[in-house]
């Protein structure tokens, strides 16, 4: 291989284009992704128990219809559109940014940083807090439902959250193993350069 071809191959490697990460940067990225994953896993664990409890009841066609329709809706809306097409790549992009630019406050609060609770665009900040408020409201509303209705709805949420965990893991694997990764971390305008 000629020297020019070798240089071209090295510069076209996405991993070679990334700056070397410091220990604090690696810690921040891992802490951010692990914290988010722990939060999602805990929710899946808690909701799975509610879902299993629902199947101890006598289920009629209305319960099964709700289970099927809600599961399909949540897989598409929460899993595919919410996580796979938006949230998961953005979370991983923010973890990559944190790894290359470890600001102490962002490393300490890395799970909140990668989730977009601070140091992001105004639009993303507003949507993150509104989405959080909506999720809290839905949790409160779902807690008022009796079984088996609650379990039928929780089953769809478990599908969406599990899809989200899986898509975040796949994006992280791609990003941290050097595969091309061109998703935006949605940083404030002052940092976007």
Image: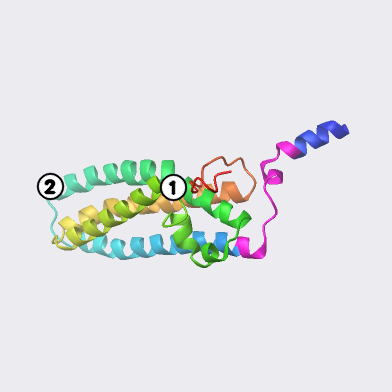
Residue behind mark 2 = 62
View extreme (front): residue: 190
Identified at 30% across, 52% down, the residue is: 130
Identified at 50% across, 62% down, the residue is: 110
Q: Is residue 100 visible?
A: yes
**Colouring used for the render:** rainbow
Q: Is residue 167 visible?
A: no
- Closer to the camera in the image, 75 or 129: 129
The crowding category of the residue bearing disc 2, from other C-alpha atoms within 10 Å (few below 14, some 14 to 19, many at least 20), is few
Kindly identify which numbered label has been placed on residue 121: 1
Q: Quadrant of the C terminus?
A: top right
Q: Position of residue 17 (x, y in %)?
A: 69, 43
Residue 76 is left or right of residue 17, and the answer is left
Q: Position of residue 47 (x, y in %)?
A: 29, 61
SS of the residue under disc 2: helix
Identified at 60% across, 57% down, the residue is: 99
Q: Main secondary structure of the magenta part?
A: helix
Which quarter of the picture shows residue 82? top left
SS of the residue under disc 1: loop
Which quarter of the picture shows residue 152? bottom left
- Closer to the camera in the image, 140 or 184: 184
Q: Is residue 42 above or below residue 115?
A: below
């Amino acid at each position: 291989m000629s020297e020019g071809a070798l240089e071209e191959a090295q510069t076209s490697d996405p991993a070679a284009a990334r700056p070397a990460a410091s220990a604090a940067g690696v810690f921040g990225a891992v802490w951010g992704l692990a914290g988010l994953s722990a939060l999602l896993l805990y929710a899946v664990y808690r909701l799975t128990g509610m879902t299993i409890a629902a199947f101890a009841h006598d289920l009629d066609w209305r319960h099964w219809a709700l289970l099927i329709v809600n599961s399909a809706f949540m897989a598409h809306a929460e899993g595919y559109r919410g996580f796979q097409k938006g949230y998961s790549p953005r979370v991983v992009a923010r973890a990559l940014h944190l790894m290359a630019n470890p600001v102490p406050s962002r490393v300490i609060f890395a799970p909140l940083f990668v989730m977009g609770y601070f140091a992001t665009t105004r639009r993303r900040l507003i949507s993150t807090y509104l989405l959080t408020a909506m999720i809290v409201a839905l949790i409160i509303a779902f807690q008022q439902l009796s079984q088996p209705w609650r379990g039928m709805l929780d089953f769809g949420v478990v599908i969406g959250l599990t899809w989200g965990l899986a898509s975040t893991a796949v994006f992280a694997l791609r990003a941290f193993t050097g595969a091309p990764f061109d998703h935006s971390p949605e940083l404030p305008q002052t940092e976007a350069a």
